[in-house]
Structures are given as C-alpha cells and as structure tokens.
Amino acid sequence: MISLLNLPASLRIAMFVFETLTASALLFGIIYNIICRAKKLQIAYYTSLFVCIVIAIITRTPLIEGMNISTANYVSLTFIIPAILSIILMITTKKWYLIADFIWCVFNITLLEVIPYYEYIVSATFVYIIVRVIFFLTSSLSVLKDLPGRFSVKYALDQQDDGIAYIDIFGQVRYINTSLKTILSKLGISSYNKSHEILSLVRTKAQENGRIVSNNTYIVNIDDSSYKFSMDNPLTQITCTNVTEEETLMSEIENNKENLSKANQELNKTLDTIDSIQEYNEILSIKGNIHDSLAQQLSILHMFILNDNSTDLVEVKKMLSNIDSSLNIKSSNEQSEIELQKLLKIIGVDLVIHGTAPNDNEIKVFINKLIKETTTNAIRHGKANKIDVNIETSDETTTISITNNGIIPTNIIYGNGLSSITNELNKIRGSLSIKSEPQFTIIATINK
C-alpha cells in the first residue's frame, strides 16, 4: 500500500497546490460567513476545515523534511472534528450535500490508508471539494457584489434630490452629494469651503432672500424654488430639501388669513351699521305708535269738547287718563282695542270688531294700527258714527275689511297714515285696496 506521504514529488506538489487553493477558499468562506452573520455552527465548521487543511499542507508538503510518518498520521485525526460538525450541520440545515464533505474529511485521515484503492478515493473526494469550492466562490461573489459598498452608497446619495453633506470633527466637509453642490453653486457658495463658512453664507442668503426659521434652519429662495437648509448642532451634517410647495401653501394661507381678517373687520362694521339701523327703526316705530295713539285720542277729545251734548267732566278725566295710558306701549292689542271702543263710545261712535287676529304678533300689531288709523280718518274726515271691522283668516291669507257709514270722499289721498300702512303691508307680504260702493271700505290682505 502506497502512503500519501510516500507519493512521488510531482503528485505531492499537485496535492499541495489543490490543498492550498482549498484553504484559501475556506478562509474566504470564514470571512464571508462572518460578514453575512451566519450561524456560529457554520462558522465553526468552516474554521475547523481551514485548520485541518493547513495541518494537512504542513504534514504533506515537500518543503518540510524529517517529520515522522506516524506523527503525520495521528495529526490527520483532526479531520474528525469537521467531519462531526458537517453531520450536525447537515441535520440542522437539511443540506444533504454535506454528507460528501463528511466523506472527504474522513478519507483525509491517513490512518485509513489500509483501505483498498484509498488513493483513488482521496483523489475523487478532492475533485468533489474543488468543484464545490468553485460553486461556493461563484455564488458568494455574486452575493457580495449586491451588498452595499462604499461606492454604491455614494452613488445612491448622489442620486438623491435632497442635498446632504457630512462634516468631520474639525469642521471640514468630508462628503457632499451632487444635489447640494448644485444648490450651493446657484447661491454662489463654493462647496470646498469649511462648514462654518457655508453656514454663515447660507444665513446671509436667507436674510437677503428668504427667512430664518431658527438658529439651525433657514429658508432660501432660488429663482422660483425654495430650499430649507438644516444643520445639526454640533455641526456634523447639512441637509437641504426643496420646500417650494410648502412655502407656496404657507404664503396662500397667510394671504387668506389677512383677507379673512379684513373681511371680518368689514363684517363687524356692517353688523354695527345694521344694529344702528335696527335700533333707529325701533325708535321710529315706538315714536310712530305713540304718535298714532296720541293723535287718535286727541282727535276724539277734540270732538268730545265740540259736542254740545257732552258736558260730563268725568268722561273728560277718563279720556285724559286714556291718553296717559297710551304711552304704555307694552299693553296688549286686545286691551288697546277695548280701550279704543270705550273711547269711541264716549263720543257716540260704535266700533264693532268681528273675528280674531291670527296667532302672529307681527300681524296683530299691524291690525291694531290699521284699525286705529282708519277709525281716526273715518271720524275726522267722514263724520262716521258706525265702524265695522271684519277679520277673516284662512290657511293662506288673512283679510281685514273696515267699513264705515261716513261721507264717501270723491278723491282718496294717501296721507302719512295710509302711506305708512301700505309700507308696513309690503313688509309682511300684503296689499291694500279701497272700495267706495256701497260704503267706504278699506281691505287689507296679508299672505302667509
């Protein structure tokens, strides 16, 4: 039986070359697995294989003389360790090709040289391991090629639209990407300046054409674009982001706020004006009510005095008391109508009211005013002594007909009283009409 250590020098040299290449591949595998953070068992397996191959190279190299053959055989027993690890790794990872690794490790134990055709088996296992190394290197290199490296990271940063620069502890710009270089160039700032110089120049540009957000943040307008410069404190990094859309939106919001503020001021002025007009109208209405009531009762008092048959001063006192009470504008419409009937009764005028006003305060007030005004006109101008008021209410309209038996005028003149009634009717969606036959009748129609 021929021992591996007793092979011809040429074969031993060839084996030495193969083993050296295998050891190199294994060393690469160890580094690769550490970088890829492989499991500790796998790293231990490749490390044990590498150590065993190195031992095999030392014991079989033609460069070392005088080593005892039996010592070399016992040293080859170290291949038992990777053999065991390969079995454990095969069971845990389900990679069945590791059985071939186990065979290769076992047949590298030179104590097994007693097996027939041992040299051929070892040669076959070496062919396997060389093929396996080639496939391992190919797949590992393809994976490493895809891993991010220094140049791939730089390329990725240079492709970013946002600008970025990194500063060292001495304030020197260690890296600046293409975008930031371009933006600084538009501002007339050299990217080769030190970081504090760049910071000072950017702050100046922000004061000239932009705004200072804070001590470390600046907005600079360049052409039709806006850029936000942000600096770390302490200064280790500079970033620049295009914020044109945000700045445009902020400007629109500020303009809208200003316009809203102006509109609010105008609205407040308008509301104040409306309040003043409303207050003025209310005063006019109160004055009108007092005026109408006083005018009516004074007219009745005047007619009472002119009536030769009316000499009872008690009635005059009542009349004066009614005039005084007419200043109380809080009295209800029903009370006002009752008082009016009593007053007219004193001077011999009969006022009859048929029907009731609808449950609408605005219409009630108008009907009361209409009765007072038409009654006064009927007594003063028509010398009437009987007045009939008819109030009819339906789902759609309210109609008030006022008829008197006085003198029918040839010409109807709209004085202040009738004009005021017509205006108020227009406000409450109504209309006024006058009939002369068979008796003088005023008809007011109010639409609901």
Image (tube, rainbow, N blue to C red):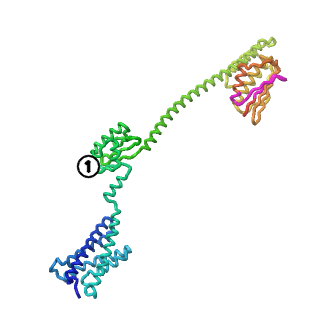
Residue 72 in the image: state x and y as whole percent: 20, 80
| Disc 1 residue crowd, few under 14, some 14–19, many 20+, Cα 10 Å | few
Give the quarter of the image for residue 439.
top right
Q: Is residue 237 left or right of residue 402?
A: left
* Residue on which the image places disc 1: 169
Q: Is residue 362 left or right of residue 200?
A: right
Q: Which residues are magenta?
A: 425-444
Instruction: Please give the name of the residue rendered at 79% of the width and 23% of the height, measured from the top-left corner.
Output: 351
Above or below for 255 versus 333: below
Residue 361 in the image: state x and y as whole percent: 69, 30
Q: Is residue 257 left or right of residue 212?
A: right
Instruction: Please give the name of the residue rendered at 38% of the width and 44% of the height, measured from the top-left corner.
Output: 228
Instruction: Please give the name of the residue rendered at 30% of the width and 40% of the height, measured from the top-left corner.
Output: 200
Q: Quadrant of the N terminus?
A: bottom left
Residue 413 in the image: state x and y as whole percent: 75, 19
Above or below for 21 versus 218: below
Give the quarter of the image for residue 426.
top right
Can residue 161 be seen here? The reply is: yes
Q: Amino acid at mark 1?
A: Ile
Instruction: Please give the name of the residue rendered at 33% of the width and 50% of the height, measured from the top-left corner.
Output: 177
Can residue 403 be seen here? The reply is: no
Name, please, the residue furthest toward the left: 66
